[in-house]
Image: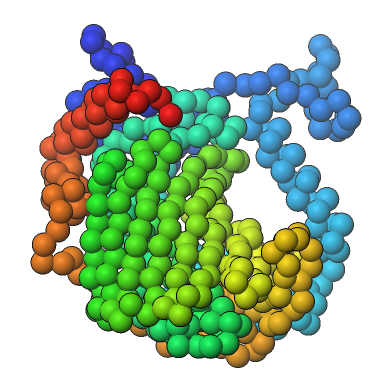
Amino acid sequence: LIVFPRQAGAKMRGGINQMDADEICKAVEAVDDQMTQMALNDLPQDDVYDDDDDDDTEVTAGGRKKRGWMSKVGKGLYRRAGSVAKAVGLVDTPASKEDEDIRAAMLSCRLPTAAGNGGVAIQDPEHAKVCRSVLSLMISQMGRNLLKGGAVMNVSFPIQCCQPKSILEIGSLMGGFTHLYLPRAAASKDPVERMKNTVACFVSAMTLTAGNFLKPLNPILGETLQVDYGDGSKLYMEQTCHHPPVSAFYLTSPGKDYTVTGHQTFSVTFGYNKMFITNKGVRVVNFKDGGKISLDFAPDRFLNVFWGEMVHETVGPQLFWDEQNKIRCRLVYGGEGRKNVPTDYFEGVIERYDPANPDAEGQVLSNVEGSWVGFCDFDKVRYWDHRATEKVGMSPPRSTLPSDSRKRADRNALEAKNFKLAQTEKVRMEEQQRYERKLREAVHGKN
């Protein structure tokens, strides 16, 4: 395990001793895969027993043997997964013809970076090594509480473990396909066709932000980003809250036919060899004729974060809704209940629903299925195919605010691989942010 000695006068910040940047970077660089495994093996052991399962423990002369909590959780997950699989008939049964057809369609239209079992796989072994070095560092500082689900949003990462981009810069990539689908949606008078193009727009854009395994820099409160897209659209983003981190955005098309507004926040927790990203917030597409489609965010997860092939997946529900026309699109990512189908498969329906009773089943108007790393079909008609879709160009405007992400001193030093200066600037910005927060709280109180 990595253990940083407590230095005289050193302050604890987010679970990591505040030390000089070079010492932090050297400590992280010293971590290798063997040390990562050691970090897991050396976690404190719980006295965990399973009273209803005698074969789950070893018996010695002195009675039952204590098992580590990691082993307990791992076996529990395996048993629960097996129980679910048996319940839906996925154990010892061949894949159905429908599932085999779905798999064949997915394998024929898939990003080169897609993982065999689903999602996007990490491509750079050095990135995987850095990610695992960071996680090993975090385990040594936070112990088993981290892997039991403890939040990590307040952990201060050594900047060498980050990529030289802010979260705002990563988020701006989501506008890469709006020029293809939202003009079509705006021109359509059919609310179902408008919904189809809106869904295709945001499902396809998931590929533009997927696979960011190196952590982006957390935006500073008040940080902004301005982007000009090649079709004339403009994007404005701002970090409006630090704890929890909330990013707000406004995208406008060149002809004002549509705008996209909203906000997003997220939290990070750990499971057994997994990291879960819970995304919250809303995006709203406002059309010139007064129409509006809203959508939420699907959850993300990173598998094999300590060992195995590291993979980014999206698994869970997502909802698009048009309350004015009383239609919605319900998607479910993950291929639950299907056999031998990669987890990037999704399926769902566009349906008419009652806004006064949203939990009731609606009237199906269209069926949708696809792979978020490849394609999106409505009623067997392809709306998005990654092989035939080109993202729009992006560039900064001629003039940007002093608070623009691309003007951050730590970001630019990191991009130049001046790690010591980057860490020094990062610490300076974090301390300034804490100081300003205390000033606000002294006047307005804690919210």
Q: Residue at (43%, 38%) from the top-left corner?
A: 244
Residue 293: x and y in percent read: 53, 70
Q: Is residue 305 above or below residue 443?
A: below
Residue 88 figure quarter: bottom right
| Image-based side of 207 in relation to 424, left or right | right
Q: Total marks drawn? A: 0
Q: Is residue 214 above or below residue 232?
A: above
Q: In which quadrant is the C terminus drawn?
A: top left
Q: Residue at (18%, 65%) from the top-left corner?
A: 396
Q: Is residue 122 above or below residue 276?
A: below
Residue 413: x and y in percent read: 14, 46
Q: Nearer the viewer, residue 270 or 364?
A: 364
Residue 140 figure quarter: top left
Q: Residue at (60%, 72%) from the top-left corner?
A: 324
Q: Can the viewer see residue 399 in this picture?
A: yes
Q: Residue at (14%, 44%) from the top-left corner?
A: 409
Q: Is residue 221 above or below residue 137?
A: below
Q: Can the viewer see residue 22 in this picture?
A: no
| Image-based side of 212 in relation to 74, left or right | left
Q: Nearer the viewer, residue 427 or 402?
A: 402
Q: Residue furthest front?
A: 290
| Image-based side of 185 in relation to 217, left or right | right
Residue 351: x and y in percent read: 70, 75
Q: Nearer the viewer, residue 387 or 139?
A: 387
Q: In which quadrant is the N terminus drawn?
A: top left
Residue 425: x and y in percent read: 16, 36
